[in-house]
Image: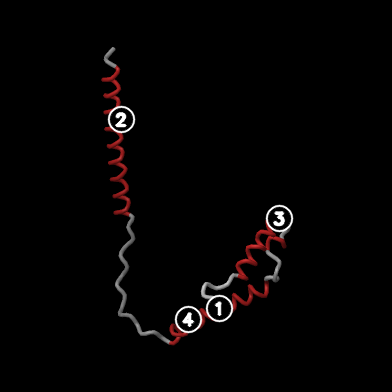
Amino acid sequence: MENLLVVSLLITVIGMTLLFIALAILYGMMYLMTAVLRDPAPAPTEAAEEPTGTEQEQPAVLRAAAIAVALARAQQETPGVPPVAETGGGDGSRWWLLHHIRRLTAQPAGS
């Protein structure tokens, strides 16, 4: 039997060679997949149109929607009763309530 050190080095060289060949094949396959499956370039669009009245009104519509959502959530929530307590949350609801009260009563940084 040959020297064990020579055998182990030979196995290491074969293994490292196979590893690098496999990595090169994997890299090549990934490169080919991205080249073949790439999305087509979008067609050039016409010159940008001037904003119409509906686009100018969009910030106002978004602001109105945000206010409506805030009002609906405020009407739905019962003051002082956390959602965890409504579902029978137990001790966890007290921690939530403490955190919620601390956030509501926190003073702004400038005050």
Q: Is residue 38 above or below residue 54?
A: above
Mark number for residue 91?
3
Mark 1 vs mark 4, CA separation in Å: 10 Å
Q: Quadrant of the C terminus?
A: bottom right
Q: Which residue is mark 1?
A: 65
Labels 3 and 1: the sequence-earlier one: 1
Labels 4 and 3: the sequence-earlier one: 4
Residue beneath the point at 62% across and 66% down: 102
Q: Give the number of the mark in front: 4 or 3.
A: 3
Secondary structure found at label 4:
helix
Q: Give the number of the mark in front: 3 or 1.
A: 3
Mark 1 vs mark 2, CA separation in Å: 63 Å
Labels 1 and 4: the sequence-earlier one: 4
Q: Is residue 24 left or right of residue 68?
A: left
Q: Which residue is mark 2?
A: 15
Mark number for residue 59?
4
Q: Quadrant of the N terminus?
A: top left
Mark number for residue 105?
none
